[in-house]
């Protein structure tokens, strides 16, 4: 089967945790032939994850005597580097044409490593006592790094990929239940959900949080002392914004923010009850389900296979 006959799925941060589980499920669950790109910043770790999943795929196909026609590929991608994003986009267009992406799952992100080793750069959902202290750490450096690591990277990746999305393509952002509107006060909940909100305005909010943390005035503007949650709230608002602003696009793209639940990752540790495979279920559901089931909830927030109120 040629590449032209296949869907193309891209998972950022796919070398471990929820990202790797998402790659696995796309590979094994897509009923339509799909080329799944596992991407990772670190080449060695990405290649290791690729090799592990490839062996698992070959073993399953041998045991089940079924060849699904799905193909796993690896490509280095640092979503924090726009040059790296452009190199990857150029590769996709070379291999699959200018319209080259059916599914983009923005999973890459992380937390800031603490001096005492209390956290690592990994995807996370919370709230163990340890994780809770991590996501609530609120100094200027932490705020800057977490906003850029979890908000601006996904915005850059999505913005650069959008011109290359195919008809009925899906864009998924992994977020956290901590990023609910209730953590904000004052005018922020109204502004974040306004139909008039633009990307420039959303960027001003995220930058305003960083600035106000540095000045110690973030509470005056309605922000919580939770940089990770503020970053993820930005992605929830971004999904809503994209669905609204691109509603007349002939490609009929679908956007969603997905909370995978409280998943056992490198950050959350033994408190988390869900496995990465369980955490991957909803983002994969949104990525693969027939668009007719999703259209009423375009731009919405999802958890446990269902849309939920922000």
Image (cartoon, rainbow, N blue to C red):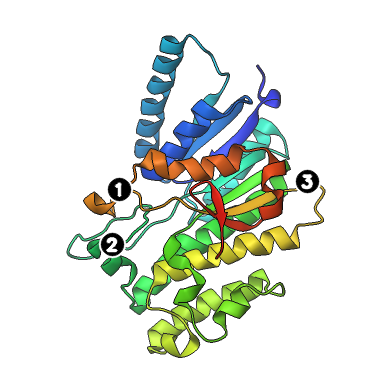
- Residue 1 falls left or right of residue 274: right
In the depicted structure, whether residue 292 falls above or below residue 248: above
* Picture residue at 46% right of the left edge, 67% below the top: 179
Category of crowding for the residue at label 1, using alpha-carbon neighbours closer than 10 angstroms: few (below 14), some (14–19), many (at least 20): few
Residue 51: x %, y % from top left: 38, 26
Q: CA distance from mark 3 to mark 1?
A: 39 Å
* Picture residue at 70% right of the left edge, 25% below the top: 4
Category of crowding for the residue at label 2, using alpha-carbon neighbours closer than 10 angstroms: few (below 14), some (14–19), many (at least 20): many
Q: Is residue 15 visible from the viewing direction of this image?
A: no
Question: Closer to the observer: label 3 or label 1?
Answer: 1
Category of crowding for the residue at label 3, using alpha-carbon neighbours closer than 10 angstroms: few (below 14), some (14–19), many (at least 20): few
The residue that label 1 is drawn on is 273
Residue 305: x %, y % from top left: 53, 46
- Residue 88 falls left or right of residue 80: right
Q: CA distance from mark 2 to mark 3?
A: 40 Å
Among numbered discs 3 and 1, the one appearing first in the sequence:
3
Q: Is mark 3 in CB contact (under 8 Å) with mark 1?
A: no
Question: Closer to the observer: label 2 or label 3?
Answer: 2
The residue that label 2 is drawn on is 131
Secondary-structure class at tag 2: helix
The residue that label 3 is drawn on is 251
Secondary-structure class at tag 1: loop
Q: CA distance from mark 2 to mark 1?
A: 14 Å
- Residue 250 falls left or right of residue 51: right
Among numbered discs 2 and 1, the one appearing first in the sequence:
2
Q: For residue 241, which quarter of the picture?
A: bottom right
- The dot on residue 288 is none
Secondary-structure class at tag 3: loop
In the depicted structure, whether residue 72 falls above or below residue 110: above
């Amino acid at each position: 089967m040629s590449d032209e006959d296949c869907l193309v799925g891209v998972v950022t941060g796919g070398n471990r945790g929820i990202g790797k589980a998402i790659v696995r499920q796309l590979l094994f669950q897509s009923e339509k032939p799909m080329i799944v790109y596992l991407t990772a910043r670190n080449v060695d770790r990405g290649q290791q994850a690729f090799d592990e999943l490839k062996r698992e795929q070959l073993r399953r196909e041998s045991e089940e005597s079924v060849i699904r026609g799905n193909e796993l590929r690896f490509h280095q991608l640092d979503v924090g580097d726009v040059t790296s994003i452009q190199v990857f986009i150029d590769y996709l267009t070379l291999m699959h044409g200018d319209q080259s992406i059916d599914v983009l799952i923005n999973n890459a992100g992380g937390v800031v490593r603490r001096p005492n080793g209390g956290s690592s750069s990994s995807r996370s959902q919370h709230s163990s006592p340890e994780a809770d202290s991590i996501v609530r750490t609120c100094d200027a450096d932490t705020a800057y790094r977490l906003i850029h690591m979890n908000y601006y990277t996904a915005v850059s990746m999505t913005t650069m990929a959008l011109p290359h999305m195919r008809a009925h393509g899906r864009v998924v952002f992994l977020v956290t239940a901590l990023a609910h509107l209730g953590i904000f006060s004052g005018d922020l909940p109204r502004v974040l959900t306004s139909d008039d909100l633009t990307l420039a305005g959303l960027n001003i909010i995220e930058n305003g949080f960083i600035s106000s943390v540095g000045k110690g005035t973030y509470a005056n503007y309605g922000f919580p002392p939770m940089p990770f949650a503020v970053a993820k709230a930005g992605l929830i608002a971004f999904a809503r914004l994209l669905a609204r602003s691109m509603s007349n696009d002939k490609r009929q793209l679908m956007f969603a923010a997905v909370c995978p639940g409280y998943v056992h990752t490198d950050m959350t540790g033994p408190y988390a009850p869900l496995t990465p495979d369980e955490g991957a279920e909803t983002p994969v559901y949104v990525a693969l389900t027939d668009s007719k089931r999703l259209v009423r909830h375009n731009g919405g927030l999802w958890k446990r296979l269902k849309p939920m109120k922000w």
